[in-house]
Amino acid sequence: MVRPAARPRAARQQHTTRGGPMGRFDHKTALVTGAASGMGRAAALAFAREGANVCAVDLDADGLASLVAEAEGLPGELMTHQTTIGSREAGHGAVDAAVERFGGLDVLANVAGVLRSDRVADVTEDDWNLMFSVNVSGMFWLCQAALGAFGESGGAIVNVASNAGLMGQAYFSGYCASKGAVVNLTRALAMEFAKDNGIRINCLAPGQTSTPMTGTIRIPEDADIDLMRPYMGYRKAARPEEQAAAILFLASEDASAFHGAIVSSDGALTTG
């Protein structure tokens, strides 16, 4: 699989220094999208804490700058790549940046996502296209590039979906559709690489998590709460660090038996 050498012109990069003990990802390189906040930020820091070289990808320049400061002194080295995702050029460009800086790629954590909610009649074309561009298309192009960049030893991909991809949720039609696509994209990729023992592709489907994205959810006025009760959950929202721990597990050799798995981390919401 051939990857173009070009990367988006708008990409900006920053670096931290190394120091301290190593962990499960010593001498490995992980690319994490959505790294400026929420689960992506928690995952980027956790990978660096466990010795990985990290390429942190996000559009939020201020968030990436604060991430660099927070990662200072961690065992792994962290670089940032400021860009949006959604196009083939952007996805391949992010992978190119990681490979150019660190000499290879071992882990791709597709955490970036966007959420819009509205009644079906009020969903706009812009909102629909944005969700599919970031949540599905961007993820696919990054997977394509990463699979071409993994060396002979293979690599691991963790795609972050949502419990919204496993169940219907009133007022979230576009989000449910895009996250359902992530679930089946993961399955399709896993089947295509089922005979390659060096490559593992899995999916995490989180439930409610305390992140900046979930803090922006606005349900329609006069929404029918009875329609929403089935997906409100039974437990408190998870912390980003808890979801990041699951991402790192699926990316690590501890999960060597996992391939094509859809792992729910939603407090049993989709169990029944």
Image (spheres, rainbow, N blue to C red):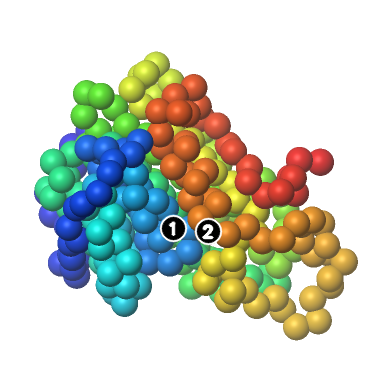
Residue 42 shows which numbered tag? 1
| Residue shown at 87% from the left, 66% from the top | 226
How many C-alpha atoms fall within 10 Å of the one at disc 1: few (<14), some, or many (≥20)? many
**Residue 60, horizontal then vertical, whole percent:** 34, 73
**Residue 61, horizontal then vertical, whole percent:** 29, 74
Q: Is residue 45 above or below residue 122?
A: above
Q: Identify the image quadrant of the N terminus.
A: top left
Question: Quick one: which residue is furthest to the right in this view?
Answer: 226
Q: Are marks 2 and 1 in contact (CB under 8 Å)?
A: yes
| Residue to which mark 2 is pinned | 240
Residue nearest the observer in this picture, 132 or 29:
29
* Kind of residue sitting beneath label 2: Pro
Marks 2 and 1, Cα distance to the nearest angstrom?
6 Å
How many C-alpha atoms fall within 10 Å of the one at disc 2: few (<14), some, or many (≥20)? many
2 or 1: tag closer to the N-terminus = 1
Q: Is residue 195 above or below residue 243?
A: above
Relative to 252, is 66 on the left or the right? left
Q: Identify the image quadrant of the C terminus.
A: top right
| Residue shown at 45% from the left, 28% from the top | 254
Relative to 235, is 60 on the left or the right? left
Q: Secondary structure at mark 1?
A: helix
Relative to 200, is 263 on the left or the right? right
* Kind of residue sitting beneath label 1: Ala
| Residue shown at 71% from the left, 67% from the top | 171
Can residue 60 be seen here? The reply is no
Residue nearest the observer in this picture, 143 or 209:
209
**Residue 166, horizontal then vertical, whole percent:** 67, 46
Q: Quadrant of residue 143?
A: top left
Question: Quick one: which residue is furthest to the front in this view?
Answer: 20
Q: How many marks?
A: 2
| Residue shown at 76% from the left, 61% from the top | 232
